[in-house]
Image (spheres, grey):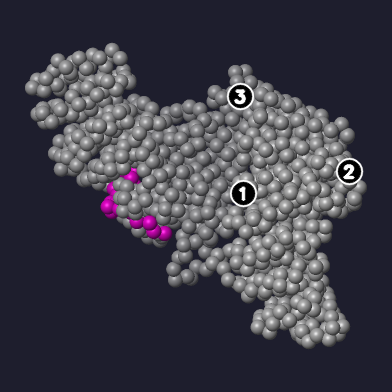
Amino acid sequence: QDVCVLLGQACQLVGFDQEHLVSKVCQLIHHLLNGFQVVMDEQNLNFLLPYCISALKQCSSWTHVEILQALAALVYNNGSKCQKYLPDLLGKAGLLVQFSDPSQPDVELRRAAVLSMANLCLSVPGQPYLDESYRSVCFQAFLSVLQSSKTSDVDDITVCMLLQDALKGVRLLLNFGKMKLMQTDQLGSLLAVLKKYMFHGLPGLSIEMPAALYPAPLPQYDKQAPAKQEQPEPAASKQAGSRRKKSKGKQKKGELVEEGKEDLCDAGNESIHRADMLKLHLGDSPASGPRACAPDVARVPAGRDPLPSHGAGSKRVSGSESEYSDAEGGIQTKTRYYQAKVRQRALACFLSAIKAIEKRVLYGYWSAFVPDAPSVGSPQALSLMTIALKDPSPKTRAYSLQVLSAILEGSKQFLSVAEDANDHKRAFTPFSVTIASSIRELHRCLLLALVAESSYQTLTQVIKCLANLVSNAPYSRLNPGLLTRVWNQIKPYICHKDVNVRVSSLTLLGAIVSAQAPLPEVQLLLQQPSSSGLSSSGSASPHHLNSAEQWRKAVPVEGDSPDQPAGRAPSEPCWLIRLCVSIIALPREDSCSDSDANSPSGSVYEPCPLRLESLQVLALLVKGYFSLAQSYLLELGELARKCMEEMDPAIQLHGVKLVEELGTGVLLQYRPDAAAAPEQRVPVSKAVTFWTMMLNGPLPGALQNCQHTALQTSACDALSSILPEAFSSLQDEQQVLCVTLLLGLNHSETPLLKAAAVRALGVYILFSCLRQDVMFVADTANSILDSLQDKYLSVRAKAAWSLGNLTDTLITNMETMGQSFQEEFSDLLLLKMLRSATEASKDKDKVKSNSVRALGNLLRFLQPCHIANPRFREAIEESLQALVSTVESEAAMKVRWNACYALGNVFKNAALLLEEAPWTTQAYSALSSVVKSCKNFKVRIKSAVALSIPSRREYYGPTEQFCRIWSALVEALQKSEDTEDFLEFQYSASLRTQICQALLHLLGLARSTDLPLIWESITANGDVIASYIQQYLKSGAGDSDAGLRHADPRGRERLLKGAVQHLGGMGKRLKGKAGARLSAYLEGILTNHARAAGLTEA
């Protein structure tokens, strides 16, 4: 405050005719505000800012630089308070617009104006920002600076500082102005200058860029000029070694490397590894394979830096000894420093631009920034990887890798088109092959960078970038081998001396085991024999969990190719599992790590981030490759138990997550559609042992740890992954413990925990040993209904899902236990469930989809005594109306097909299907409309299923209604190939099959009064119907997804024969022509089918 008052008084004393003093006062403003980080109050700002604006208008030009510097300091972080001065500064004839114009001869003046503009673009959250018109003025001014050419009379350092300020301004506009780069010209112009300045001053490169880049699938504009002769390094910079800085803690995802204050010589005094030197380490020669990793990289003992050791001529040498006062290299060093800062600002600006551009737009410029395999005879196009490999500044290399990571993040859909070319004689290169080539080149370049990098912080970024690539690349569509090279190259870094490098290496291994799992290539890599000195007797059994020496031998010294036969003894565990277990559970060896800032003082274990990452890798491995991990189920369970007993909440949490993945792995093996043969499953007895260990251990304590709700939530998820067969074999007190804990947690105030608890109850209600317990069913129902009223959508959505499962259990009990269960179940609770489900069907789609499923089950469960009860009557009418409305609504397709399915369930309750019931007319009308016209074929299928469910003719109502249903089905059959969405065609065959079944079902029930209208329809469309019924009779396999009762061909023939007999018998009894004609029509179809089948067999 004192500083602000002082500056105000100084300005009051100095008039504009005293130009020398005006200059001095402005210097004082500039230095004081910058030096003391003063927050300018609005009162003094409203005096000082007009003073500077008036001074610019009235004083001589020689004072303008100092005045603008003061102005820049004043507006910094005060943009929202400067709104009334913007016309003077940024209007059509605004001062900053004039001074920043490319025609301005004084570069220092221009730079001060650009800096003032950039500072105006800085915003305080919650405060008003620049209007769109002013943003556009600033953007154009910055772009003009970046597009203008350097004149010979301006020194390089001044130009670099001007460029930095312009790039800063663009970045602030993108970050704070939420500027969306929608216009192709605007975006193309910006990307062109950003690409140009990413390489600004990079030794050995000279880049010519067009005024704008345009989206294209192939590289177009990179025209690399002949490389200039590199200037020799200053003598003082030629050291024999490279100084390495330790990484300062784990960096947050997506956050730029902190610029901070660095030595000026940091940016340009490391020479470059040449690509041909790197190829020696990567084995890029034709004869080399995945094992060609250099021995001096691979065979590094724990605790040693695994980076390659080259001669002095090929090292990145540090010039930290150099100083500006050095007459031989001072100016050169300073210039390189500022050039590196320009490159860093350009990359930071590009990172902001990536966040402001839609991904689908960004990927149109993929080839301009991401390397592609060079064609024969042409140089490698300039890309982000050029910087990562060749820039002498480790900070700039790290920036480029962060930008590449941001491009790769979320690129899975774009990269999914990639496919390796099998035909090399094509006249053109398809886009899919181009993308596949780019993915391969990214792998090659990043592995080069991995071997070449000497900065630990940048090395971490290389590995993170590789992990991002691995997470998004479609390896199932590419030739195998890419992951093998990554796998073998990353192994030495697991024992790197820097903890952050080790953590990111584990992250990369986790990405590999989770990439489109299970991949055959990764399966082979995980089964590789561990060549780390294990005895030939294979004594390193996973059962020796507590044997530190056995588990220490986890990391193979050199990766073996998966081409070799996997000849490991059955008792030898997967090396990756051994590695993770050794990091998590065993005391650390001092030689393994010298950077334990994240580890508690005196801790005997590895640093916490390393242990957490190992737990996550184990969880991913179990999830993707459970068949490999299942033999270690009890050992990994013991490991998870130990983790849950630790004091660190993060270790506890990931221990519980490991339990969940182990439980889910066993659970998936017992699903009906599981790929595992019965003899390959984990035995139920082993699963019982596993869960007994968990429930007698710390899992109940984790469920009751109120101080750590995330741990409780994960423990609920883990408890819901128990195998039903294993649960029924647990001791009674353990079963009661599980149920009691879940029922109690369902009353939590924490939404995530409550959602997890109610979901777990929804799982347990399906267990055969629990669902027949009426008391448990009632308690669970009350808990679910309570959660269904919760104010949080996430809780209500899980509760609705559990309610659907609960009502499935009611139907199962009704079918297996008969009337005894229905009589024992509380009428009051049933009514409450019906009303709650009806109310929930009006909620959001996430709740609605399962609520309507529950309604269908509840209405099917009702008995005549309920329907006759006056208390139920209103609730039944409301619920039926809710279902019909949902079918007719514009809700999400999943909601509508569940509503159709629910109506089908209602039709199974004969007590509700009275001929005079008014709701049936609405229901049949809604289903008939949907089956003809819904865009989604799965909804049409469900509606056709529902229309084929009523088992007696009187349930379909009068003849007019019956014939309307028939006509709707015929029309739907004719429209079964009409769709605007190509993806719906995959369901068209199932739709026709279900409609044909519904038509035959109706014919098998038809009355004589129905036949004339049906025959009229057959007369008009008989050939079409006959052809589709022929297809229906021939098909059979693959239609199980349609929910058919007659999926096999014989069952379909029986359905058709039943309709023939019904119509023929009715024709004989009533001597009606329509019945006989219909019977003959169907017999003709049957005869043709039999003839076609006979020819096929012959």
Q: Is residue 205 magenta?
A: yes
Q: Which mark is residue 824?
A: 2
Spatial CA distance of label 2 from label 3 is: 67 Å
Vertical position of residue 472 compared to residue 913: above or below:
above
Measuring from the top left, give residue 1078's x and y in whole percent.
77, 83
The residue type indicated by label 2 comes to Glu
Left or right, residue 727 beside residue 935: right
Q: Which residue is mark 1?
A: 845
C-alpha span from label 3 to label 1: 56 Å
> The N terminus lies in which quarter of the figure?
top left
**Looking at the image, is mark 2 or mark 3 nearer the viewer?**
2
Badge 2 crowding class, 10 Å Cα cut-off, few under 14, some 14 to 19, many 20 or more, is few
Q: Report which residue position mark 3 lands on.
A: 590
The reply to whether the C-beta atoms of the residues labelled 3 and 1 are less than 8 Å apart is: no
Say which quadrant the C terminus sits in. Answer: bottom right
* Residue type marked 1: Asp
Crowd rating for badge 3 (residues with CA inside 10 Å; few <14, some 14–19, many 20+):
few
Residues rendered magenta in the picture: 194-217
| N-terminal label among 3 and 1 | 3
> Is 358 colored magenta in this rendering?
no
- In percent of the image, x 78 and y 64: which residue is there? 915
